Image (spheres, helix red, strand yellow):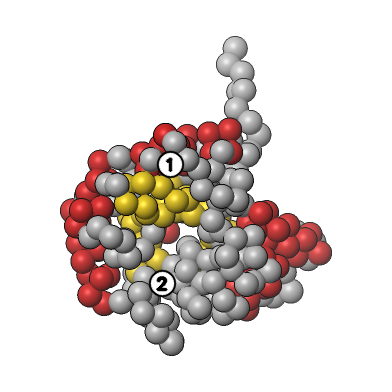
Amino acid sequence: MFLNLAPPCASVRDRDRKTLMQVFQTIGAESCPREYNFHMHTIYSDGRLEPEALIQQATDIGLKGLAITDHHSVGGYRAAQCWLEERRSSSGGDASGDSVPLPTLWTGVEINAALLDVEVHILGYGFDPDAPAIEGYLHGHPVTGKPYLAGEAIAAIHNAGGLAVLAHPSRYRRSPQELIPEAARLGIDGSEAYYAYNNPDPWQPSAEETERVRKLNYLHNLFDTCGTDTHGLNLLKRI
């Protein structure tokens, strides 16, 4: 007789991850910031938004899905998830609340790591925030020693059931032409193709950098992702 010893939420987490992979396969220049946004910060790291204000704003914008990617913390995610659960509960289980569709919120985090002897940021998505594999990266500060290596951070995200993405690959002391192939070799799943490097208003991805990163992602079979990297009070801007 077969006994299913997997945690009750395991199938839900697997389904969320598969859905996220499907979303990443469809991301384009028009996706961010009004359909999807996978890079935002709250007061739980270096952002100015309360998590509840962020998820309310995301709902008002009409986002279909998002991830809060505080540095080395899932506190903002947990608070926003509670907000969503309360909204669903108050509407009697109707996910649309009071006729306003609620977005899908995936787990997210931004981790400092060393790649080719420079510091980069690795975004983690769709992981189990309670998994022992990633627990050491969620204490609000960068790690040191072997866990600081990009390969270790990527493996931790994967072992927690998530997807790993190289954030803003054109912002580092090494070029994306150097970093993306090495990150791919280490098992990364994607890199942030659609990113506004000069903080334009309104937000739009930087055309030259986007084209370069998209070509590298295609060459290395990686997902394209998008995000505003919001640190201020407006999810439609970076600052």
Question: Which amino acid, by three-letter code, is at mark 1?
Answer: Tyr
Image position of 163 with respect to 86: above or below: above
Q: Give the residue at x 73% y 62%.
A: 83
Q: Does 103 sit left or right of 199 as displayed?
A: right
- The mark closer to the camera, 1 or 2, is 1
Query: How many marks do you count on the picture?
Result: 2
Residue 53 - label: none
Residue 60 picture location, percent across and down? 62, 78
Residue denoted by label 1:
148
Question: Which amino acid, by three-letter code, is at mark 2?
Answer: Ser
Residue 205 picture location, percent across and down? 34, 76
Among numbered discs 1 and 2, the one appearing first in the sequence: 2
Between 108 and 98, the residue placed more toward the observer is 108
- The quadrant of the picture occupied by the N terminus is top right
Between 126 and 20, the residue placed more toward the observer is 126
CA–CA distance in space, label 1 to label 2: 32 Å
Q: Quadrant of residue 5?
A: top right
Residue denoted by label 2:
31
Residue 13 picture location, percent across and down? 56, 43
